[in-house]
Amino acid sequence: MEQNSRSPKQRQIVSTARALFWKFGIRRVSVEEICTEAGVSKMTFYKYFSNKNELVKFILEEITAESISKYRRIMNQKVPFPEKVKQSIQLKIEQTEALSQEFFEDIHKKAEPEIKEFFHQKIQESLRLILHDYTAAQKTGDIRSDIKPEFIVYFLNKMMEMVKDEELSRLYSSPQDMILELTRFFFYGILPRKDKKRTKHV
Amino acid sequence: MEQNSRSPKQRQIVSTARALFWKFGIRRVSVEEICTEAGVSKMTFYKYFSNKNELVKFILEEITAESISKYRRIMNQKVPFPEKVKQSIQLKIEQTEALSQEFFEDIHKKAEPEIKEFFHQKIQESLRLILHDYTAAQKTGDIRSDIKPEFIVYFLNKMMEMVKDEELSRLYSSPQDMILELTRFFFYGILPRKDKKRTKHV
């Protein structure tokens, strides 16, 4: 089922389901409801997806592919490495913000094992990709040689939690300010850039 | 009730209670039990503390004072600022590791409002102290001028969560390795120390 080879009806089912799942989570949305909203018969539905789980996996596949392709486009640019990372953090934050709590909760905690496992695999694929980029960046000297790329990936995920943390956002007048602070910290830590020099830099 | 002016009996009550609270939390330990274990009469107990809450507050006061005095000793050393921070992170980690889950849970979530409020005040006092040090360090150029000291304090707390996170500790062969990684990251971020230079440093 390739994105390009999709029929308008299948496209209609998928985009309707995506919107409904986004709003209500997965468990609360039935195949019937999707068909009614999409204006297709159940027969048409089952022509494309053997059950709701297959549709959910199709959508997860789609979301992952979209996000990986955006990430790849950022990393393939001919700009300095920190600029790429900055943009990729920005992308991840946007995606996290756009993520529906209902959808995420269902996928993450309450979904059937089949879905959970599929989602887990997709995440692992993305992480391997990112890990590969950071390992390469370490070889070219773009990041510290004495840091574990796995730690970087772990911390990027932590950052997404922090972005949603009220305790932190309270410190900033805008989300952008907070994101800038986090990104700068991610790059530079707390110490001044020039070693040991006691000069103030604005 | 100054530490120095305490009678051996009061000392006995406090250290017994501290051990019991540590092991079982606060709610599950009664004044009777403390008295029996400490080998003092209830009359003696009430000579020093009007009720269990007063004893709990006394102990919280004691714990905070000990930890602040250790922190102060570190910060007053005549060593470079990063060395002080390194030691203070080490101290905080040791204290977090030594902290009993039962005690912490009771204090943090299940304690009576009076205790919770008291604990909250104590934490705020410590945070103000640390914040003061980081604000001063910013003025002397020891940390980046474009970072919020409040962010640093926030991140230090996050680091304590990370230290206890299995997902992270799995990446390292020893807790020390993980702590070193976190500390280095806290100081330097992910970028190499020398700007833009593509030299590998081991």
Image (cartoon, coloured by chain):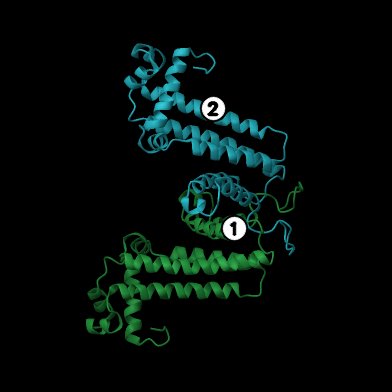
Chain colours: A green, B cyan
Residue corresponding to mark 1: A148
Chain letter of disc 2? Answer: B
Q: Is residue B27 left or right of residue B10?
A: left
Crowdedness near tag 1: few (<14), some (14–19) or many (≥20) residues, C-alpha within 10 Å: some
> A62 or B37: nearer the eye?
B37
Q: Secondary structure at mark 1?
A: loop
Q: Is residue A43 left or right of residue B119?
A: left
Which mark, residue B65? 2
Residue at image position (54%, 56%) is: A155
Residue at image position (37%, 74%) is: A59
Q: Can residue B25 be seen in the rendering of this structure? A: no
Number of callouts in the render?
Answer: 2
The image quarter containing residue B106 is top left
The x, y position of residue B150, in whole percent, is 57, 45
The image quarter containing residue B51 is top left
Q: Can residue A33 be seen in the rendering of this structure? A: yes
Identify the residue at the far front of this view.
B173
Amino acid beneath label 2: Ala
Q: Is residue A37 above or below residue B3?
A: below
Q: CA distance from mark 1 to mark 2?
A: 37 Å
The x, y position of residue A146, in whole percent, is 65, 56
Q: Is residue B54 left or right of residue B182?
A: left
Chain letter of disc 1? Answer: A
Looking at the rendered image, the disc whose residue lies closer to the viewer, 1 or 2, is 1
